[in-house]
Amino acid sequence: MAVLVGVGVRLSRRQNTTDEYFLAKRSVPGWAIGMSLLATIITSVTFIAYPGASYAGDWSLLVPGIMFVLVIAGIGVVVVPFFRHAVAMSAYEYFGKRFGPTVRMYSSFAFAVGHFSKMSFVFTCSHSRSEALRVGASRGSS
């Protein structure tokens, strides 16, 4: 923990503006942004549910999985360049300029609610899976 705090303090001296802190002076390459988007969307449910459903014989998740790669590529080509030029700090700032503060507040609130709902679903699924494994292991050992 001390090393993490030390690295944070050392690197914070190099940053003087919010643009440097939040946007890295807009120097992050597009492929890194794409990988960040990909890592943000994929959860443990993806690693548990997709292979499990495929093993059970339901290959219907294969098409969305393939489309996911195409959509992310499209986002990298169309959306990321747009945001790099049109948006100063965040999508919510753009919504505020384009549609007003009401839409900005609604979109940020909707994102927060959706994100916390997704997190609770992932935690619930992970907990129920680990609980099933624990109960199964205790039955096998007795």
Image: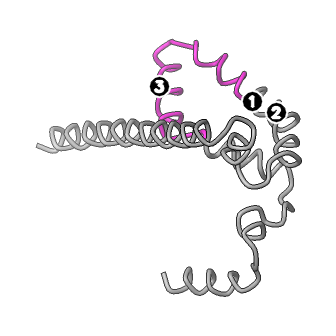
Report x, y in % for residue 41.
60, 39
Tag count: 3
Q: Which residue is mark 1?
A: 69
Mark 2 neighbour density, 10 Å: few (under 14) some (14–19) many (20 or more): some
Report x, y in % for residue 50.
53, 26
**Picture residue at 52% right of the left edge, 27% below the top:** 51
Report x, y in % for residue 70.
78, 26
Between residue 3 and residue 82, name the one nearer to us: 82
Q: Residue 64 magenta-drawn? A: yes
Label 2 or label 3, whichever comes before in sequence order: 3
**Picture residue at 48% right of the left edge, 81% below the top:** 1
Q: Is residue 113 shown left or right of residue 62?
A: left
Q: Residue 139 magenta-drawn? A: no
Mark 1 neighbour density, 10 Å: few (under 14) some (14–19) many (20 or more): few
Label 3 or label 1, whichever comes before in sequence order: 3
Q: CA distance from mark 2 to mark 3?
A: 26 Å
Type of amino acid at the residue the image marks with label 3: Gly
SS at mark 2 in the image: helix
> Residue 52: which disc?
3
Give the magenta-colored segment's residue range. Answer: 41-69
Type of amino acid at the residue the image marks with label 2: Ala
> Residue 6: which disc?
none
Q: Which residue is mark 2?
A: 73
Mark 3 neighbour density, 10 Å: few (under 14) some (14–19) many (20 or more): few
**What secondary structure is the stretch in magenta mostly built from?**
helix
